[in-house]
Image (cartoon, coloured by chain):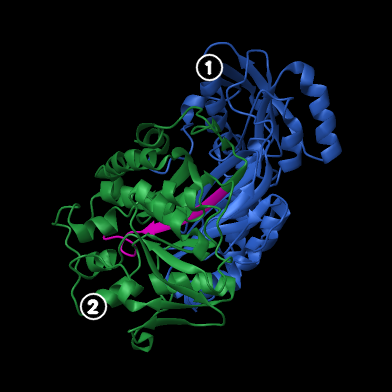
Chain colours: A blue, B green
C-alpha cells in the first residue's frame, strides 16, 4: 500500500464538500468558507507525549481532544482539521494507520471537525493536527482585570496521576486514564462564555503555569484559595494539591470574569452540566499566591519541552 | 532555553495583528479574517525529504516554497502559516532553531505568509507547515475536458538531478541545487490563471504522476509530445527526458485550458516572465501517452512514501 492508497483507505472519510468546506481531501488544498477563523496546531510525538505502546485508537482520540481544546479556549466552533502523520515502516506494516483512523474519525466527528487534508510521511511516529474553527467572538488572554473572579471547569490532577503511574493494562475508563486519554470537550460551554468572560485558556501545562499566561498577558496578579482548587477524586493525599496545581494535560478551562457575570455563568454551567469552581481573584500588581500552599516548594513553570 | 523562550526568540516575528490576521502567536489559537480559505499541510522529515546535514536556512526556505506551491496550485493568495517543529535536543543545543528561523522568516515574507502559530516539540527533526490563503476562485483538478491543451511552467528534471548527485558543497546557486532548494514561487501567475484554466496542480511527484491526478479527477486521458517537454539545461542526455517526466520536487505548475485561452495565458506568461510550454492535449478515454517515449520502461507512479 502506497501513500495515496493509505490516504484513500484511512483518511478520506471526509472527502467531499460539507457546510463551510468547499473542497476537501484530494486536491492541492482544502478550501474553507470561513469568516473569522481560529487556527491551532499541536504535535504529539511517540515517547514524548504518549507511550508508544498505547493503542493507536487512544492516541488518535487524545490528539483530537487536546487540539480541539485550543478551539474551545478561544470560544470557537470547530470546522475542519488537517493531519500530518509520520509513521515508521514497521508501524505502517502492522496496521497502525488503520487503527489510528478508527479512533480518529469518531473523535473528529464528536468534535465537529471534518478532516480536509494533510500529509503522510515516513519517520518516527508523530501526529500533527491543525484545527480550524469559526470564531466570531474570540476570547483572548489579556482581558483579566483586578477584581475579576477566576473559575475553572472540572477537576484537576487526574492526568498527572495517569502519567506518574501509567498503567495501560487498566481500562481507558479508569478515572485517571480517562482524564489523560479522553480529556473533556468543553466546546459549547466555552462558546457560550464568549462575551461573559474577560480571559480564557485551556489547562495544558498545569493550572499555575497556564494561569500565569493570563496574568502576564493581562499584566495583573492573582490570589487563589488553596482549599477551593477542584481536585480529581482519589489522588494520593500528600500530592493531590500539587498535582492539581501543576499537573498538566487536564484540558479543563480556566477563565476570568467580572463578578456581575458569575450568576449567568453558574446558570450556564448548570444547564450544560459542566462543573465550575471559583478558585480566586485577579489582583493589581504582579505575582500568583495560593493561600495554604508554599509555591516556592515546587517548579511552577509548567512543562517545557526543552527545559 | 525552554519551549516558551524558543517561541519568543525564534518564532514570534509575526506576533500581533495584520491585515486578515486578527490574533497571532501567543494565544490558544490564531484568528484569521478569512472568507474562502485554501489550507494545505506538508511535512518534511530529515533523512527522508532533505539531507539532515543541509543548512537549516536552506531547509526552511525549501519548506516554505514547497508548501506555498500548493496555494499557488489552487490560485490562492497566501495569508498565514503555522509551524510544527520537532527537534532533537542536540539540534536544539547547536542553534538549529535559530538558523532555521533565519531562513524561515524571509521566505515566509517573500511568500506573503505570516507565521501565526504552531508547536515546538522534542523528537527527530521534522517540519510540518500548514499554509492558508484566500481563495476566491479555487482551481481544482477535475475540470480538464477533451480538446483542452496542457501547459507547464518552467523547466523540469533539475530537482531530480540535485537528488541523484547531491552535492551540498556546491553553492545553492548551482542550477540543480537551486531547483531543489529554491523551487519557484508561481503565485501571481497562478492567481491570474484562475478563470482561464480548467485544472491545475503543482508538480511535486513528477509530471506524469501529477498529471495522472488531473486525468483521474477529470476522467479523461492525455497525449504528450515528448519533444516538447521543457527540460532543465545540462541534464545528462541519456536521462534528461525521464527525469523531466518523472522527477519530482520541481514545483512547477501543470494546467489545462480550452484552446481559446491560450493567447491570454501566453500574454500573461510574457508579462510576468514565467516560461510556459504547451506539451500536449487532453483526450477522451483513459491513459497517458508520450510520443517518442516508452512509458512501460519506467515507474510512472511517482514518489510514494510507503511504496
Question: Tag 2, which chain?
Answer: B
At horizontal 41% and vertical 33% (from top left) the residue drawn is B12
Q: Is residue B180 left or right of residue B260?
A: left
Residue underneath mark 1:
A219
Q: Is residue B122 visible?
A: no
Q: For marks 2 and 1, give the CA distance.
A: 64 Å
Q: Is residue B50 magenta?
A: yes
Question: Tag 1, which chain?
Answer: A
At horizontal 84% and vertical 35% (from top left) the residue drawn is A270
Instruction: Label 1, secondary structure: give it.
Output: loop
Q: Is residue B269 visible?
A: yes
* Quarter of the image that includes the C terminus of chain A: top left
Please tell me if label 2 and label 1 are on a single chain. no
Residue A278 marker: none
| Residue A68 vertical position relative to residue B241 in the rendered view, above or below | above
Q: Nearer the viewer, residue B286 or B89?
A: B286
| Residue B34 vertical position relative to residue A292 in the rendered view, above or below | below
* Highlighted magenta segment, given as a residue range: B38-51
Q: Nearer the viewer, residue B301 or B201?
A: B201
Q: Residue furthest top?
A: A284
Percent of width and height locating residue B273: 33, 49
Mark 2 crowd level (few <14, some 14–19, many ≥20, 10 Å Cα) = few
| Residue A7 vertical position relative to residue B175 in the rendered view, above or below | below
Percent of width and height locating residue B246: 35, 74
Q: Is residue A143 magenta?
A: no
Which quadrant of the structure image shows residue B143?
bottom right
Q: How many marks?
A: 2
| Residue A283 vertical position relative to residue B56 in the rendered view, above or below | above
Mark 1 crowd level (few <14, some 14–19, many ≥20, 10 Å Cα) = some
Residue underneath mark 2:
B239
Q: Is residue A92 left or right of residue B225?
A: right
Instruction: Label 2, secondary structure: give it.
Output: loop
Amino acid at each position: 500500500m502506497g501513500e495515496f492508497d493509505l490516504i484513500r483507505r484511512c483518511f478520506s472519510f471526509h472527502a467531499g464538500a460539507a457546510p463551510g468546506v468547499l473542497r476537501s481531501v484530494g486536491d492541492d488544498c482544502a478550501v474553507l468558507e470561513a469568516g473569522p477563523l481560529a487556527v491551532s496546531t499541536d504535535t504529539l510525538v511517540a515517547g514524548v507525549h504518549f507511550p508508544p505502546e498505547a493503542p493507536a485508537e487512544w492516541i488518535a482520540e487524545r490528539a483530537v481532544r487536546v487540539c480541539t481544546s485550543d478551539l474551545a479556549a478561544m470560544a470557537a466552533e470547530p470546522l475542519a482539521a488537517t493531519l500530518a502523520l509520520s509513521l515508521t515502516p514497521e508501524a505502517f506494516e502492522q496496521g497502525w494507520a488503520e487503527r489510528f483512523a478508527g479512533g480518529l474519525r469518531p473523535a473528529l466527528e464528536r468534535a465537529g471537525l471534518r478532516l480536509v487534508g494533510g500529509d503522510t510521511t515516513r519517520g518516527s511516529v508523530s501526529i500533527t493536527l491543525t484545527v480550524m474553527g469559526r470564531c466570531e467572538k474570540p476570547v483572548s488572554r489579556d482581558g483579566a482585570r483586578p477584581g475579576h473572579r477566576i473559575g475553572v471547569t472540572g477537576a484537576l490532577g487526574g492526568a498527572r496521576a495517569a502519567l506518574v503511574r501509567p498503567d495501560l493494562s487498566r481500562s481507558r475508563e479508569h478515572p485517571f486514564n480517562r482524564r489523560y486519554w479522553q480529556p473533556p470537550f468543553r466546546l459549547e460551554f466555552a462558546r457560550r462564555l464568549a462575551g461573559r468572560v474577560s480571559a480564557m485558556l485551556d489547562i495544558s501545562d498545569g493550572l499555575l503555569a497556564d494561569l500565569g499566561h493570563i496574568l502576564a498577558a493581562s499584566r495583573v496578579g492573582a490570589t487563589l484559595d488553596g482549599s477551593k482548587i477542584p481536585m480529581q477524586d482519589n489522588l494520593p493525599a500528600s500530592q493531590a494539591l500539587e498535582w492539581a496545581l501543576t499537573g498538566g494535560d487536564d484540558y479543563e478551562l480556566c477563565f476570568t470574569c467580572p463578578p456581575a457575570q458569575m450568576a449567568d455563568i453558574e446558570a450556564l454551567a448548570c444547564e450544560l452540566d459542566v462543573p465550575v469552581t471559583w478558585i480566586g481573584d485577579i489582583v493589581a500588581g504582579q505575582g500568583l499566591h495560593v493561600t495554604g500552599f508554599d509555591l516556592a516548594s515546587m517548579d511552577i513553570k509548567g512543562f517545557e519541552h526543552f527545559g
